[in-house]
Image (cartoon, rainbow, N blue to C red):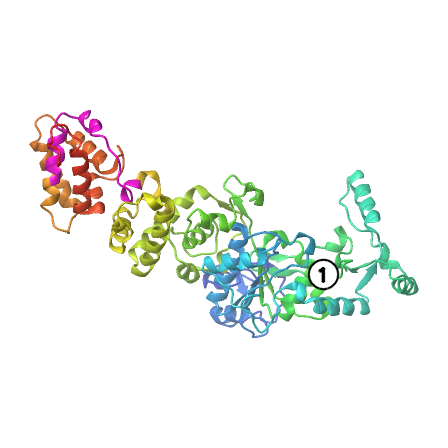
Amino acid sequence: MHGGGMNLPLVVGRCPALFRAGCARGAHRFRRGPADQDAPTATRWLCSPEPPTAWCRRRLSVGGEPVRVRFAPSPTGFLHLGGLRTALYNFIFAKKYGGRFILRMEDTDQTRLVPGAADAIEDMLEWAGIPPDESPRRGGDHGPYLQSQRLALYADAAQKLVEGGMAYHCFCSSQRLELLKKEALRSGETPRYDNRCRHLRPEQVAEKLARGAAHAIRFKLQPGVKPYEDLVFGWNRHEVADVEGDPVIVKGDGFPTYHLANVVDDHHMGVSHVLRGTEWLISTSKHLLLYHALGWEPPTFGHLPLLLNKDGSKLSKRQGDIFIQSFRQRGALPEALLDVVTHCGSGFSSNRVGRKLEQLIAEFNESKITTHSALLDLEKLPEFNRIHLLRRIEDPESCFHLENELRGYITQTYGARIQEEDVLESAYIQRVLHLRKGHFSYLCELVSPLYSYLWVRPAVPHKQLEELTPEADAVTSQAIQLMEGHGKELTTEGLNSELKALAKKMKSTKYSTVMKLLRLALSGQQQGPSVAEMMVSLGSGESCQRLRRVLQQSPNVPSSS
């Protein structure tokens, strides 16, 4: 029995039955009842009689409609890590509940638009593997998806508010507004509009409009804001009328501000859930007043905690290295970026390194999103990238794409210096990838000077080998015989054993010196992978050729001429 007809006080908190059941909302209103006899100190939680899972499923839609979420960046710059994270949570939420992920460009600030930014943002979402279902590029049933092409909708909504007495024309000049701001700051107060034009008489407004006076439209903030339940922060309310002046909803140029445009667009696009950054938490009460004034049902709101640097400082676009295009150019894999930005946050049933997108979707639970800021440690990205690169190499289809990408790096880096076209063949590149997997974090590392020997024959003076041991020629000759005795199938394990046996044949040269000499002869380097791995990578034919080139420089070896 729920309530027994008793008038119980309303309490705000988490209902344990629903919370333990993995409820989608997490925080609910409930009424506290008397302790039951089985647990004298317990509290009876009086909530919906429906099974928790069914109740939660119903709450994850608005009016029975499917889940529809949106990512609405402003193309005044390019996509950065904070934006990618917001888009990712929206994408995961949509896919988790069989919904739609919308990309909408909020391009109403025409003075700050960056040419090409809108296309670049969508490009990066596609590259990251989280493409929108509806967007300026893909279209959809709720377009257009550029706010600059939806001005008539905003004008209609603003006119409705003005006619209903819930908004008004403001004729204050920018100079007057600036004076108000300076005066407030001088007095140690928070700047706010004094609502002067709210009190103009109708005939005064008509006269100013008739002579074409410049004006904006402001929304009348009303006291008595109702609380709303946020998916992350629980019950919230902000009495905005007490701390703010009436906000502008249509600017002097006829374009809407964010406050009006996002409400109008979310309504007409059928958005069911708004998942956005916590910086908009305080503005939500203002937006709910707009929904109420327009007579529309608001969506469910969820505000994601901030993404900060590991030292707690704010991510800044001025850092220059937080843009997704920059990560892509440096060789970061999209799945590694998605993994690292979710690993530092919350909302998932586990926090493992190496999760793919489908695993993130499966493990997502919005009731587990905490209010704590997520501290991003980008120094961990190379390790995340190494793990995901290893997995790509082990997948035949993905490895084929890596092969083509690496081939491009090779030709771009070494070009005409490549003596043998064999290094560009599929079998050779695949062999290198599989031998070196797990040892590099970015694919481009394989064309660094450390690995140049894989693509270009080194020029090694015989004198360098003689400085290591007087048995240089003997070591080189024995290694040639060893490689000539092998067929195409080489293994690092087998060669390691044979190289140890070779070293034992030398009279005065230690094993470590033998390895140093062969590494130098094969690669021109004193450090790097094991000699056995080098030989397997290069193949028996190329290994023999390099060793012969060095040996032919010896004064003790007769000239082939």
**Residue 336, image x, y percentages:** 41, 51
Q: Residue at x 56, y 52 (%)?
A: 78
- From the image, tell me which residue sits under label 1: 256
Q: Along the line of sight, which residue is nearer the eye, 150 or 5?
A: 150
The image shows residue 290, relative to residue 440, as above or below, that is below
The image shows residue 196, relative to residue 378, as above or below, that is below
Residue 453 falls within the magenta-colored stretch: yes
In the picture, residue 530 is in which quadrant? top left
| Residue numbers of the magenta segment | 452-480
Q: Residue at x 55, y 51 (%)?
A: 305
**Secondary structure under the numbered disc 1 in the rendered image:** loop
Would residue 29 be seen by someone viewing this image from the given angle?
A: no
**Residue 536, image x, y percentages:** 20, 46
In the picture, residue 237 is in which quadrant? bottom right
Q: Along the line of sight, which residue is nearer the eye, 61 or 358?
A: 358
**Residue 208, image x, y percentages:** 89, 61
**Which residue is most to the front?**
561
Which amino acid type corresponds to the residue marked 1 in the rendered image?
Pro
Q: Along the line of sight, which residue is nearer the eye, 382 or 283?
A: 382
Would residue 403 be seen by someone viewing this image from the given angle?
A: yes
Is disc 1 surrounded by few (<14), some (14 to 19) or many (20+) residues within 10 Å? many
- In what quadrant of the picture does the C terminus appear? top left
Residue 113 falls within the magenta-colored stretch: no
**Residue 361, image x, y percentages:** 43, 61
Q: Residue at x 22, y 35 (%)?
A: 519
**Is 421 placed left or right of 215 in the picture?**
left
Q: Residue at x 83, y 61 (%)?
A: 169
